[in-house]
Image: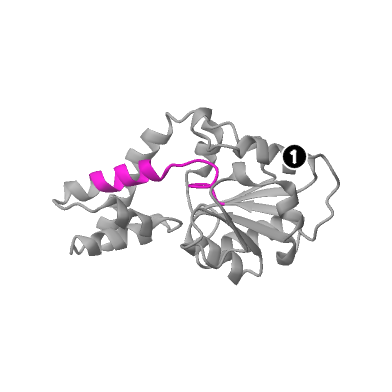
Amino acid sequence: MYHLRNITSNIKACLFDLDGVLVDTAIYHYQAWKRLANTMNFDFAEEQNEQLKGVSRMESLTKILAWGNITKTEREKMELAALKNSWYVEMISKMTPNEVLPGTVEFLTAITKAGYKLALGSASKNSSLILERTNLTHFFHEIVDGNSVNKSKPDPEVFIKGAELLNVSAKECVVFEDAVAGIEAAKAGGMKAIGIGKKNILVHADLVVSGLDKLTIEDLERL
């Protein structure tokens, strides 16, 4: 499927979201947030959890508290967010390379050999741990995550910073995202966007596929 070649397209860099694109940790987020909600005597559906994709930890907590009609002080919110994160980290610390989504290693290997620059652009503050556990760290020239940016998607900060670190312009970047907020962030930053998911949801992406296993370098060259 893949061919080693020099880059012939306008795209020079690939910026990847983590959750739902390279690995699927959404279930771990859901289980941790659900456990937190249960400690406050309410629950929320997995469908509601979709609204938390690509959203920062504190913004996710704000949404969840609203669903439970619960008010907390800022200090209490920080304590709740830390508690949720401790449960989440406990789960992802047990991740293995077997949890990498289909086609990910092959696609990352191919675009690396072809000369594309790679950066991670994730809201997760645990991205380095996840990449380490799944043996993906070595693919990325730069890692931009929740520890190094202040604004959440759909603000383009995480992708703009990634482009700056890779020393490429926005128009030379393509973003790989599974969330609507992530696609909006890419577009707001002046970048191309490839959606990983469903076409009827990621309607503003330049191309939508079900996974990285469905992509080729030719797809990048056509953008």
**Front in this rendered view, residue 21 or 163:** 21
Q: Which residue is drawn at 51% across and 60% down?
A: 199
Query: Residue 152, can we see it?
Result: no
Task: Give the residue pinned by disc 1.
Answer: 2
Q: In this view, does 216 lie to the left or right of 149?
A: right
Q: How far across and how far down the image is residue 192, in percent?
A: 66, 63
Q: Which residue lies furthest to the left in this view?
A: 41
Q: How far across and how far down the image is residue 108, in percent?
A: 67, 40
**Front in this rendered view, residue 14 or 157:** 14
Give the quadrant of the N terminus.
top right
Q: Which residue is drawn at 58% across and 31% down?
A: 135
Q: How far across and how far down the image is residue 7, in percent?
A: 83, 51
Q: Which residue is drawn at 79% across and 40% down?
A: 3
Query: Residue 172, can we see it?
Result: yes
Q: In this view, does 105 lie above or below 78?
A: above
Q: In this view, does 5 lie above or below 98?
A: below
Q: Residue at x 58, y 60 (%)?
A: 158
Residue 43 among those drawn in magenta: no
Q: What residue type is labelled 1?
A: Tyr
Q: How crowded is mark 1: few (under 14 residues within 10 Å), some or many (20 or more)?
A: some
Instruction: Determine whether the residue tagged by mark 1 lies in a helix, strand or loop.
Output: loop
Q: How far across and how far down the image is residue 26, in percent?
A: 40, 45
Q: In this view, does 44 lie to the left or right of 8?
A: left
The region drawn magenta spans 17-35
